[in-house]
């Protein structure tokens, strides 16, 4: 079960700001407890002796509850149906599949898969409401099993390597990826080495011998664009291939092969504006690249020459439709950069924090996507919610010759990229990057002021609002806090108060009301339709969300509630919403303003941006997508109160290739055009009405 909690405790911290020093309460001393919430309690494992513990958040209510089984640290575990399934060891069965609901009576053996020894269940994942994991027997080797989430029965899902051969390796971390209702994973059939397989929960398919022969394929990162799943492959010659798959063997193809030594540095792919961004290597060195699955291109040669800038995208963030990341150049060293993601667009140095060629080595603090982390489906593209900000900015650490490594913040502008506080005055480091956590009130992190060692700190983004929470281990040694989770408005974390042998940690909570950052909006749009204004929005993740209130105004100052849409509650995937305001034309104004009131279950709320919609006037909108296009082009235009409209398409020579006349057109119109017979090249779309005209261009591939 230690594997389950590794993701939970490596990088976590808490959130809430209180100008007065918050107090901490010791819940358990010296049992090295780590875990997560289960129902009304907290279920934990002691890293000292692998025993199971339960806590209600009080010292009296924290105790070991199961005595007949211990957690097998060589196996795995995860949560399903408000219970934890794990590899457990008892005196009779060895290491087998156990389940616990947090009570002694509810902690039982699920299945003795290997009756002659230990099956050591591992590689747990929840998919389609069922639990999948690997286990070993003498007859079948290590293969994949399935626990039915409805009735709890366990069965062999597939024997990938027939006979006693292993389809999976114990101790090798399995990189699962879920997209479009398909589960991707690595398995070995005995002939092809470890290759990529896929299942919909019933059928199982190997997606090809990506690395021919018995040599295993080394996949370094997963991501997706829509229903297509992308992955990067490090070849035996340390070059890089980008692949994509639609879940079929025929649809599993190479997108781009760099075929250059040293390009296997891709550890993550970042999804931004329907493209994937990654660090790829060609003759220009390791630089920022992008792909949409068809076109793969160098976005910017940040560090001209063969050395490369080595852009770090693992913890990159997205602010104001720009990617912010660190990169290295010969003149500025390793600094903070910003890009619009467009080839030939704007990719520039955001701030030279450590002037000259010295490195600032900025390390960004994106918000963790806790829903994904708690589910166990953690990959480099979904561990963070990269668009979620605290009061419009993101925290990060950086160093310079004057301050050492300290806490900074950025809103994506030069003026808004500033030092928050020199916590350890002088050139010594004041922050540690291993632990941080956001809430609506601020950031909790591990800091060192020079007299206390690494202790819990809190910041609201201002120097005056950045202070130590408590000196848990008095003196300069530090308690090295690692923050775990928020439950019922309380932060729990582990630390060392110094009263035990080295390596034994204690379990604490911070005595302050806490709340997560609210829902993250991916986009929000308001479009004039025939008889209504249609609002569309999407969220990248939701935690404890309750509802979206729809508000309308005629002056952008006074807003009225006109509707409400229930929120998903908790979601780790993109969720889309639509609301039609069919009374917009009765509002008594030619211009309307809309916003969302996003409310969480704990009562906290925030507003979205305000959108403006004109009900009458000239042409306000002309769009074409996708762009570039292959076969079918959608043209969206808004003529508002025009009596007629003419839509034309011309090539670069001025030749007209399409014409459509609209009499008494709807205020907003979507026209789908088949352009499959158009020659490859650039085209111009022109919309002409009696109130004016507008022209845009698109590219036919």
Image (cartoon, rainbow, N blue to C red):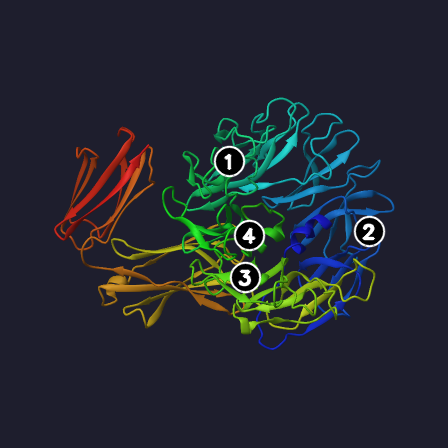
**How far apart are labels 1 and 3 at the CA level?**
42 Å
- Whole-number angstrom distance, CA of label 2 to CA of label 1: 50 Å
Q: Hey, which quadrant is residue 430 in on the image?
A: bottom right
Q: Earlier in the sequence, mark 1 or mark 4?
A: 1
Residue 266, placed above or below residue 593: above
Q: Residues within 10 Å of mark 4 (few under 14, many from 20)?
A: many
Q: Which residue is mark 2?
A: 69
Q: Earlier in the sequence, mark 1 or mark 3?
A: 1
Q: Could you tell me if the residues under marks 1 and 3 are in contact, i.e. CB atoms within 8 Å?
A: no
Q: Earlier in the sequence, mark 2 or mark 4?
A: 2
3D distance between C-alphas at marks 2 and 4: 50 Å
Tell me the residue that label 4 is attached to.
359
Pointer 3 or 2: first along the chain: 2
Dot 4 or dot 3: first in sequence order is 4
* Front label number (2 vs 4): 4
Q: CA distance from mark 1 to mark 4?
A: 22 Å
> Of the numbered discs in the image, which one, if any, rests on residue 281?
1
Q: CA separation, marks 3 and 2? A: 34 Å
Label 2 packing within 10 angstroms: few (<14), some (14-19), many (20+): many
Measuring from the top left, give residue 228's x and y in whole percent. 48, 37
């Amino acid at each position: 079960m230690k594997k389950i909690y590794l993701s939970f405790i490596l990088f976590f911290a808490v959130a809430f700001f209180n100008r007065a020093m918050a107090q901490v309460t010791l819940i358990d001393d010296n049992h090295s407890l780590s875990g997560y919430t289960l129902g009304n309690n907290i279920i934990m494992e002691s890293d000292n002796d692998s025993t199971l513990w339960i806590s209600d958040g009080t010292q009296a209510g924290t105790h070991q509850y199961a005595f007949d089984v211990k957690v097998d640290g060589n196996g795995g575990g995860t949560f399903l149906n408000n219970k934890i399934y794990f590899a457990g060891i008892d005196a009779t069965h060895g290491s087998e599949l156990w389940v616990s609901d947090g009570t002694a009576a509810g902690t039982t053996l699920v299945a003795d898969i290997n009756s002659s020894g230990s099956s050591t269940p591992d590689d747990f994942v929840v998919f389609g409401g069922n639990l999948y994991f690997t286990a070993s027997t003498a007859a079948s080797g290590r293969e994949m099993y399935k626990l039915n989430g409805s009735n709890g029965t366990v069965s062999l899902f597939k024997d990938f390597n027939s006979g006693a051969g292993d389809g999976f390796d114990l101790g090798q971390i399995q990189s699962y990826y879920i997209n479009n209702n398909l589960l991707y994973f690595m398995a070995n059939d005995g002939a092809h080495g470890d290759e990529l397989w896929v299942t919909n929960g019933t059928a199982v398919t190997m997606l090809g011998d990506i690395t021919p022969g018995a040599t295993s394929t080394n996949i370094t990162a997963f991501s997706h664009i829509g229903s297509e799943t992308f992955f990067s492959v490090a070849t035996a010659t340390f070059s890089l291939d980008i692949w994509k798959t639609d879940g079929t063997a025929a649809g599993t193809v190479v997108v781009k092969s760099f075929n250059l030594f040293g390009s296997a540095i891709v550890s993550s792919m970042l999804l931004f504006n329907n493209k994937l961004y990654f660090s790829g290597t060609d003759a220009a060195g390791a630089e920022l690249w992008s792909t949409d699955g068809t076109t793969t291109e160098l976005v910017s040669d940040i560090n001209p020459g063969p050395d490369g800038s080595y852009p770090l995208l693992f913890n990159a963030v997205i602010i104001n439709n720009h990617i912010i990341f660190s990169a290295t150049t010969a003149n500025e060293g390793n600094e903070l950069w910003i890009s619009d993601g467009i080839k030939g667009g704007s990719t520039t140095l955001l701030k030279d924090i450590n002037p000259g060629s010295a490195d600032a080595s900025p390390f960004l603090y994106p918000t963790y996507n806790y829903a994904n982390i708690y589910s166990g489906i953690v990959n480099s593209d979904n561990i963070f919610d990269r668009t979620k900000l605290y009061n419009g900015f993101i925290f990060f650490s950086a160093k310079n010759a004057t301050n050492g490594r300290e806490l900074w913040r950025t809103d994506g502008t030069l003026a808004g990229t500033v030092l928050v506080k020199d916590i350890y005055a002088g050139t010594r480091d004041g922050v540690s990057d291993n632990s941080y956590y956001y809430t609506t009130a601020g950031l909790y992190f591990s800091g060192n002021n020079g007299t206390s060692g690494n202790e819990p700190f809190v910041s609201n983004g201002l120097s005056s609002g950045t202070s130590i929470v408590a000196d848990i281990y008095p003196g300069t040694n530090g308690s090295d806090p690692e923050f775990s989770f928020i439950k019922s408005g309380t932060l729990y974390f582990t630390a060392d108060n110094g009263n035990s042998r080295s390596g034994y940690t204690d379990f604490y909570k911070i005595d302050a009301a806490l709340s997560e950052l609210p829902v993250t909006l991916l986009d929000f749009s308001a479009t004039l339709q025939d008889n209504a204004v249609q609002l569309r929005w999407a969220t990248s993740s939701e935690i404890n969300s309750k509802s979206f209130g729809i508000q309308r105004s005629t002056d952008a100052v006074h807003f009225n509630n006109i509707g409400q849409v229930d929120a998903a509650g908790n979601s780790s995937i993109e969720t889309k919403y639509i609301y039609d305001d069919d009374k917009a034309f009765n509002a008594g104004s030619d211009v309307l303003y809309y916003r969302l009131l996003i409310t969480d279950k704990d009562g906290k709320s925030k507003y979205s941006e305000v959108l403006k919609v004109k009900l009458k006037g000239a042409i306000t909108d002309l769009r074409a997508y996708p762009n570039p296009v292959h076969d079918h082009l959608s043209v969206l235009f808004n003529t508002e109160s025009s009596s007629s409209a003419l839509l034309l398409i011309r090539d670069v020579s001025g030749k007209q290739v399409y014409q459509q006349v609209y009499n008494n057109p709807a205020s907003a119109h979507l026209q789908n055009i088949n352009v499959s017979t158009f020659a490859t090249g650039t085209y111009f779309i022109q919309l002409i009405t009696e109130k004016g005209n507008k022209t845009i261009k698109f590219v036919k591939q």
